[in-house]
Amino acid sequence: MMTTTTVPTMATTMAAEAEDPTLAARVSAAVRAIPAGPPLIGAGIAPLRQALAEGLRAGGLPTTLQIRVDRETLERAERCPAAAASARFAWRAVLASRRLGTSAVEAMLDRPTLGAAEAATQAVEEALTEGGRLGLWLAGLSAAGRGAVIAAATTWSSRAFTAVPWVDLGAQPLHGIANGYPPGYPQVTIAGRYDAELGRGRGLAVLLLIGGMRPAAASLDALGFTLHRGFAPLGVVVLDPSRGSVTSLLVDEALLVATVQAVVRASLASGRRLEALPMEMTPGSHCRWCAWRDGCPPGRAWLDAAPRRVNGIPV
């Protein structure tokens, strides 16, 4: 039986900010403020896997459907179930700059004299040489497009390198992929990711995410990590260098159970969309960016009734 410990969810490290205004000090304080245990590990993960499988079976999801639940899918499903279905993973500039920026940080830690621009350029060259999906995506860009990616990766790595006390926290700067799979549903991927694992030992890890994101996104990454590694992180620290913000998410069983329920809802909604079955629709401002809007009568009606306006003029 799972026991639940109630803890705060998202909380900014305001006390640390008052003591020391530097981002690095605030990141360090946020990490060290996360309680060390008791870890959720081994057999304690089994109820989460069981709840995932039972929820999908109860919703009638076919085991043959290929569904990927990532941060974006989860957020879309919470706004409108009809928008949940996601396409297969594809590289885009924001993801590529983050992945390449992490490689650049690793290189800068190995060679302290290496600058961010040189490290980012080197990361792009290595990706092109190695091939793979990222390399193929980069190869398909124009010279100007690759230059823009290098510039974005340079900015990302420069900010991350100075804002995180990598050595002091024992961090492993890497772009971690933590995919989980519900039992009996090998085609359903819970796609978690993180920028670094701040290790305190098995079952005592803290995940670091860099960039602005909502709590639901961070909890999805925590669940993916838990299913992939067989133990839950103690917490997640989210650093947004562009805003100068540091937030922390404590990971307990209650949070993971709630995230399992959200993943089940998103998976079932994706399944109904892929099978062209009737489904709930909740039109709103998100319809403007929905990939399914052209075939969604309620969404089109909402857009027609509420056109975008610039200085009061519909556009």
Image: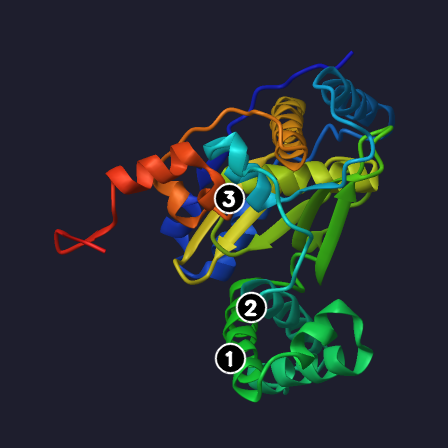
Q: Which residue is mark 3?
A: 292
Classify 10 Å Cα crowding around label 2: few (below 14), some (14-19), many (20 and above). some
Image quadrant assignment for residue 153: bottom right
Classify 10 Å Cα crowding around label 1: few (below 14), some (14-19), many (20 and above). some
Classify 10 Å Cα crowding around label 3: few (below 14), some (14-19), many (20 and above). some
From the viewer's side, name the closer residue of 158 and 218: 218
Q: How much space separates mark 1 and mark 3, taking CA atoms?
A: 29 Å
**Up-down relation of residue 209 to residue 255 (above or below):** below
Q: Position of residue 300 (x, y in %)?
A: 37, 40
Q: Amino acid at mark 2?
A: Ala
Q: Which residue is mark 2?
A: 93
**Up-down relation of residue 27 to residue 112 (above or below):** above
Give the mark toward the camera: 2 or 3. Answer: 3
Q: Amino acid at mark 1?
A: Ala
Q: Position of residue 174 (x, y in %)?
A: 71, 62
Give SS at disc 2: helix
* Residue at 23 percent of width and 56 percent of height: 315
Q: Which tag, 1 or 3, sits closer to the chain's start?
A: 1
* Residue at 51 percent of width and 74 percent of height: 152
Q: Is residue 234 visible?
A: no
Tag 2 and tag 3, C-beta contact below 8 Å: no
**Up-down relation of residue 106 to residue 249 (above or below):** below
Q: Which residue is mark 1?
A: 148
